[in-house]
Image (spheres, rainbow, N blue to C red):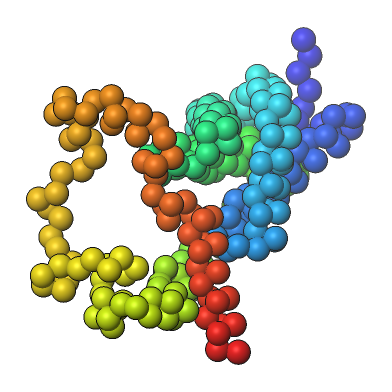
Amino acid sequence: MQIKHPHEMYKEPRSRRVRILVVGFFVLMINAGYLATFREVSTFYFLNVMLHIILGLMLIVPFVRYAYQYLQQDVRFGKGFGKMMGNLGFAAMTLGFLFGLIVLFRGKMSREAWLLYSHIGFSVFGCLAIISSIRRAGYQISVDNVYITAGRWGLVFFIIAGMIPIIGFSVRTVFPTVNYSINNNNVAKNLMYDLAPEQVYNHFYASPASSSSKDISDTDFIYDSATCGQSGCHVGIYNQWKKSTHAVGALENTWYKSSVTTLQVDDEQSTVN
């Protein structure tokens, strides 16, 4: 089989599809940077979530096809390091896709957050490794070819996508606002008119319960739910509970927590107005 020089891809019909694949990955990287930074309840945010899912699914098959073709033919131009990074990048991106599919079908549960983090970690490393490999291969071919162009712009978009969450988290740290956490608003507190003020504004709101010290108690002596199953006294009940949605805290869901925060802010603003 005749192996063509990489810069000849521009002359082949597949070159347009390759460029579309590369541009799709650029968009996906920026989209991922946005999702890693913002967790707002807005149409734009949820459209980006859908874009991430749809674009990721659309890129799986073309990526596997052309990346495998690159590893079989052109990665040799990158020599030892380029070949190693190409193979590592391909393996990491494949794992990133697989973990992404698992997260898509299972959902982001607090007990399985490692699935989401694995998807992010493998995808980030895979992108960086692939970019490094094609840049090294491109520089060994000629001064101007398809791999140099793709690698250069890939690195630019990778840095931009990485800077988005860094800048976002830095701004939140330097200029924190009350909207970043759940707070009991005055509207709900006013509904507890039949309770004494010390009950409404204590740490146990909205429950009328309290402690003798009127403060939060040390929880080190309280056993967690797993001990119910380990002790052998409530194994059946514990297993049923663990598989149900009752085992998951509502506010551990990022989207639900954002919805609650937005609802509280809207209620407070409507009360003031």
User: Which quadrant: the N terminus?
Assistant: top right
* Total number of numbered discs in the rendering: 0
User: Of all residues shown, which one is farthest toward the front?
Assistant: 194
Reply above or below: 42 against 139. Answer: below
Q: Say left or right for 122 vs 24.
A: left
Q: Farthest residue toward the bottom?
A: 273
Q: Nearer the viewer, residue 149 or 194?
A: 194
Q: Residue at x 47, y 73 (%)?
A: 179
From the viewer's side, name the closer residue of 152 and 137. 152
Percent x, y of residue 122: 49, 37
For the view shown, which residue lies furthest in the top direction?
1
Evaluate whether residue 163 shows in this view: no
Q: Nearer the viewer, residue 161 or 270?
A: 270
Quadrant where the C terminus sits is bottom right
At 51% from the left and 72% from the top, the residue drawn is 264
> Picture quarter containing residue 207?
bottom left
Horizontal side of 18 relative to 158 (left or right) equals right
Q: Is residue 183 visible?
A: yes
Looking at the picture, how far across and down is residue 70, in whole percent?
A: 68, 26
Residue drawn at (71%, 26%) of the image: 61
Q: Position of residue 32 (x, y in %)?
A: 60, 51
Q: Nearer the viewer, residue 197 or 184?
A: 197
* Residue occupying the point 28% across, 83% down: 197
When the figure is inspected, residue 117 is found, relative to residue 180, above or below; the finding is above
Check the image and report above or below for 123 versus 254: above
From the top left corner, tell me how far across and down residue 120 is, in percent.
50, 43
Image-based side of 93 in relation to 8, left or right: left
